[in-house]
Image: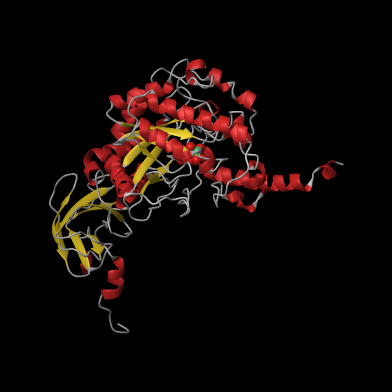
């Protein structure tokens, strides 16, 4: 009987396996999350020199605020998201046939770079190798790479050239996890039992404990991995960002991540690196959510335009241009960056919906970019119809729902004239205000509880978000709890 043939171990594996699948799917899809901060024993105290060097390397990155992520590889040919190989259980020998069929248009990256520039993005991060293991560049370490397969050319070289031609900073995404390399899974013999445990929901080695490995496989695979990264950071001139991804199935120690980063900084002294090789790196990477790090720690929220990173023909869950602008404002407000993804088609062209959304964002950034770039973290909490950014003593109110009322529908004297943007709890004195895009002066009245910007036009002057620039006499802090505490109350009854 079939049933009796399934051992307890196997059934545990099956249970664990489906949980693992669920966890991976969550992660791969639009799964929110961040890589947990390393445990204290993993995080080494950093010297003032190390901190000063980070400040130097990160300066442009903090100022830039907005980047383009590009997911492009063999998975783009399937058009079912970049996790298709694992999600659909495609055998390696079948999957790798895609490598021959991959025949993108020459220099597709030029259109991406132009689009990024137009959208106001200051840097790009392209997948050089995703989990599928296919290398988009000319590597000596495997034949499973673009120049030796269908494309017949170095796609990373084309990308680098395209980004530079538009004056954009160049970033490389690199997945440590590899579903194609023969040692990519067997380097850790405990990968399977790890999946059986309840810890399976945390694919990030929750306690960092070393697992037993097939040491010979690990050495080969780590050498291969370090070798690929070495090529990427040696053969393409100055690279600005190295964006590691999933470090399954090894620990930072087993990946030799410290040595990895040392090599990276030796080859590229100005580069910035993220936190997905098991070490904290320079910045954290909340995914599909905007989740600020504690003060002093840099972060970048990466997000898709629909729900998929790789090209997914059927995914129609597109975000609006307004949502993207609001997200960008929120990241800037909390001192973070926004890395927004496109998933080009197999020929390299960008899905038209992505072009449409990014163009809308670009039009807005043309006028309002200065309220985002180089802005500083802002101690202004939420508002129902606006977001905020700040530069010194200047507050930018980003109004996304223009609070005009049709004449006659608002009875309160307080709201005459009908279009008033009001901020409760502004703890600084307003000196002047204007509409940012047109420069038109805005009238205001202020008391201890609220600042009210009055006589605004009935229709929103800008789209999808209107910015009011407010010059204050000190750092503008918006503390709505001040209103709750300090606003004089009425008598009981009216
Ligand atoms: C996750 C996904 C991966 C995607 C990445 C982007 O790690 O597994 O497919 O490239 O997120 O941040």
Observer-nearest residue: 449 or 141?
A: 141
Q: Is residue 210 visible?
A: yes
Determine whether, in the image, residue 324 is placed left or right of residue 3.
left
Question: What coloring was used for the rendering?
Answer: secondary structure
At 16% across and 57% down in the image, what residue appears?
A: 455
> Across the whole image, how many numbered discs are drawn on residues?
0
Percent x, y of residue 426: 23, 64
Eyeballing the image, is 341 above or below 288?
above
Q: Quadrant of the C terminus?
A: bottom left
Eyeballing the image, is 450 above or below 128?
below
Observer-nearest residue: 429 or 421?
A: 429
Work out which residue is located at the far right of the displayed protein and give it: 1
Percent x, y of residue 303: 42, 42
Q: Quadrant of the N terminus?
A: top right
Q: Is residue 69 visible?
A: no
Percent x, y of residue 161: 33, 22
Eyeballing the image, is 207 above or below 348?
below
The quadrant in which residue 166 appears is: top left
Determine whether, in the image, residue 181 is placed left or right of residue 360.
right
Percent x, y of residue 351: 43, 30
The quadrant in which residue 64 appears is: top left
At 43% across and 44% down in the image, what residue appears?
A: 275
Observer-nearest residue: 81 or 151?
A: 151
Determine whether, in the image, residue 133 is placed left or right of residue 457.
right
């Amino acid at each position: 009987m079939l049933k009796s043939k399934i051992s307890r171990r196997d059934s545990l594996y099956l249970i664990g396996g489906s949980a693992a699948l669920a966890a991976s799917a969550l992660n791969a899809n639009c799964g929110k999350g961040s890589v947990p901060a390393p445990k204290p024993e993993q995080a080494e105290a950093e010297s003032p020199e190390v901190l000063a060097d980070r400040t130097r390397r990160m300066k442009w990155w903090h100022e830039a605020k907005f980047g383009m992520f590009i997911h492009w590889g063999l998975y783009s040919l399937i058009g079912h998201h970049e996790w298709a190989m694992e999600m659909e259980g495609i055998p390696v020998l079948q999957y790798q046939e895609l490598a021959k069929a991959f025949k993108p248009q020459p220099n597709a990256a030029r259109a991406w770079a132009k689009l990024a520039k137009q959208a106001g993005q200051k840097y790009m991060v392209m997948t050089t190798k995703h989990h599928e293991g296919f290398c988009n560049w000319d590597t000596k370490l495997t034949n499973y790479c673009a120049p030796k397969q269908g494309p017949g050319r170095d796609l990373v070289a084309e990308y680098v050239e395209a980004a530079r031609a538009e004056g954009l900073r160049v970033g490389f995404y690199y997945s440590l996890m590899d579903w194609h390399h023969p040692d990519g899974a067997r380097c850790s013999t405990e990968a399977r039992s790890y999946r059986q445990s309840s810890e399976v929901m945390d694919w990030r080695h929750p306690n960092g404990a070393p697992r037993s490995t097939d040491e010979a496989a690990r050495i080969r695979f780590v050498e291969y991995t370090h070798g690929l990264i070495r090529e990427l950071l040696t053969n393409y001139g100055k690279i600005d960002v190295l964006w590691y991804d999933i470090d399954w199935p090894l620990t930072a120690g087993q990946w030799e991540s410290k040595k990895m980063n040392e090599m990276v900084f030796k080859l590229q002294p100005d580069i910035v690196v993220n936190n997905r090789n098991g070490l904290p790196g320079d910045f954290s990477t909340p995914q599909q959510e905007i989740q600020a790090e504690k003060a002093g720690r840099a972060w970048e929220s990466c997000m898709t335009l629909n729900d998929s990173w790789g090209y997914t023909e059927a995914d129609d869950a597109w975000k609006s241009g307004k949502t993207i602008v609001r997200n960008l404002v929120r990241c800037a407000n909390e001192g973070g960056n926004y890395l927004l993804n496109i998933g080009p088609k197999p020929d390299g062209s960008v899905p038209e919906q992505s072009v449409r959304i990014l163009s809308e964002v670009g039009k807005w950034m043309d006028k309002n970019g200065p309220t985002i770039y180089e802005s500083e973290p802002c101690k202004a909490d939420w508002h129902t119809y606006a977001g905020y950014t700040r530069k010194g003593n200047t507050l930018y109110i980003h109004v996304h729902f223009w609070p005009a009322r049709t004449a006659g529908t608002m009875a309160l004297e307080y709201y005459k004239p009908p279009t008033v943007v009001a901020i409760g709890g502004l703890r600084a004195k307003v000196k002047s205000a204007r509409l940012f895009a047109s420069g038109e002066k805005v009238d205001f009245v202020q008391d201890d509880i609220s600042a009210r910007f009055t006589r605004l036009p009935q229709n929103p002057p800008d789209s999808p978000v209107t910015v009011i620039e407010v010059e204050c006499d000190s750092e503008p802090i918006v503390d709505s709890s001040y209103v709750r505490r300090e606003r004089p109350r009425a008598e009981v009854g009216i």
